[in-house]
Amino acid sequence: MSAGTILQFVLDILSLGSLYALMALGLVIVYGILKLVNFAYGELIMVAGYTLYLLNASPFPWLVMALAAILMAIAIGLMTEFVAFKPVRSKSVTAVLITSFAFSTLLQNAALLFISPRARNVPLPDIFTQSVEILDVVIPIRNLITIACALLMLGAFSFVMKRTVLGLALRAAASQFTMARMVGIPANMIISLAFAISGLFAGVVAILWLGRIGSVVPGIGLEPLLVAFIATVIGGMRSLLGAVVGGYLLALIDVSFNYGLSQQLLHFRDAFTFTIVILILLFRPSGLIKGRETGLRT
Amino acid sequence: MPTWEPVNQRGLKMLKVENLEVRYGAITAVREVCLEVSVGEMVCLLGANGAGKTTTMLSIAGALKSTTGKITFNGRDITSFSPERVLREGIAMVPETREVFPDLTVRENLVLGGFIHRGDHRKNKAQMEEMLALFPVLRDRQDQQSGTLSGGEQQQLVIARAMMSQPRLLLLDEPSLGLAPTIVHHIYEFINKLRSTGLTILLVEQNANMALKHAERAYVLSLGRIARQGPAGEIATSSDLKALYLGS
């Protein structure tokens, strides 16, 4: 294997893994607090995509449009909390899961009804389609942007969680929610903050994901949701680090199969991937990074 | 260390619980509980396992909602307040389960203890220094993950963390639970130091002898009701204390 192929292999894993890690973090931040999976998470990506599409005709520069798309994902993330979670938070898990699914379906159907069931191209700057050549290997710049963006996001997120009082409050609420309230951390603020951060991750993921596929459809959120869910399950549902590790590991598995499987077997790549996921879970049922038992659902 | 309450306020009623009733589904854990705590007092709430002590404390702290009854603090009705609001009123609770935030360091736990004063860095810093001076072991271990501390150290941490909010009333739930006798002795030394500053304390204990030795007044809960109340010395010599503990 040449140095160029190895470089390409590593960069493919890093770029796909970065994307998967961001997807997984957005999902696990809410799970950490509420002990519930937000099934409307994929729709935040869809909303950001359609915001970018609708702003196509606007005179704003692309960066402003991208920022607006991310802000919209944050706003809808907060709305998910107010509409789907808050009214039934104290009820059964089933009730919250149903409202979460319902909100997801509502958003998808709104996109179908008011925009179109067909794919819509989103505006992207040229840099997303350009490539650079390193060691005789053509590397899409969007892959490098994804890696840089993930490093920036993970670094900033790590700083906030470790060095700021709000980050500490989030971590405390994720481990002992009632106790966190008893030291004066406001429950509603922390839950809203978790949804806002989740929306921020979804918005950034949307930009990077659309940078790869170029168009948005109402069902665009399903794949990122599934990826995020699998990554958090193999990494560890109770650990933020686990979500990141799970994202990169899933990318390693996917990219390895892309490189190693023949054209005929490549059709069954997902089956192979899930087999490995099952094997991991057989040996590590709580995921690779277990995290602490955090007790009752909020 | 500052005195928590001005001397001229001592003896005034601080906390008043009237006809408190708390249910867990169909089970009534606490009924018709009435108690009072005055400024600067240390009052203990005794009783056997399941008598309703922790339930009463959690209701006062806002973590459990009562079915009926009224809780007033400094004349203000706090019955329906959330735990965050109760803390802002000046009531901090140290739970029996010593719930440190295990992934956070000792210092980070203390920082969160001062969450309600987070805009006032000087106040929080001064309070943290006081707590680290009062609990020297926490100073030595301030960068250690709190989940790795011993039981006694965790107990000191949760007391110090509660004190970071500078409460006027401290609710202490079973501070001796699961600790070796020598450690319990140390914990009560710390509690006495806090008390000497004028802090008002409501203490829940199963270790009746220890609690009665330190408190001024006591309430004994039996099967969810107040079965006895009076000066600690009187309760300690009461012939039926053992019977009340056994729920007979």
Image (cartoon, helix red, strand yellow):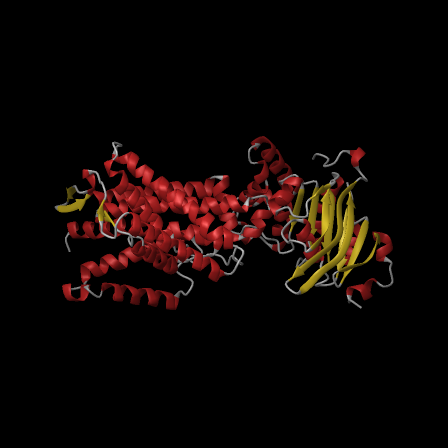
Percent x, y for residue B140?
Answer: 58, 44
Looking at the image, which residue is at 62% across and 47% down? B83
Percent x, y for residue A48?
Answer: 32, 44
Instruction: Give the total number of marks visible in the rendering.
Output: 0
**From what the image shows, is residue A278 above or below residue A145?**
below
State the residue in front, B67 or B205.
B67
In the picture, measured across the screen, residue A161 lies left or right of residue B51, that is left
In the picture, measured across the screen, residue B114 lies left or right of residue B1, that is left
**Is residue B185 visible to the viewer in this orientation of the structure?**
yes
Quadrant in which the N terminus of chain B appears: top right
The part of the image, by quadrant, that contains residue B96 is bottom right
State the residue in front, A13 or A218.
A218
**Is residue B176 visible to the viewer in this orientation of the structure?**
no
Looking at the image, which residue is at 67% across and 40% down? B90
In the picture, measured across the screen, residue B8 lies left or right of residue A153, that is right
Percent x, y for residue B117?
Answer: 59, 36
Looking at the image, which residue is at 75% across and 64% down? B223
State the residue in front, A245 or A36.
A36
Residue furthest to the front in view is: A113
Looking at the image, which residue is at 26% across and 66% down? A271
Percent x, y for residue A20?
Answer: 31, 52
Quadrant in which the C terminus of chain B appears: bottom right
State the residue in front, A31 or B138.
A31
Residue furthest to the left in view is: A136
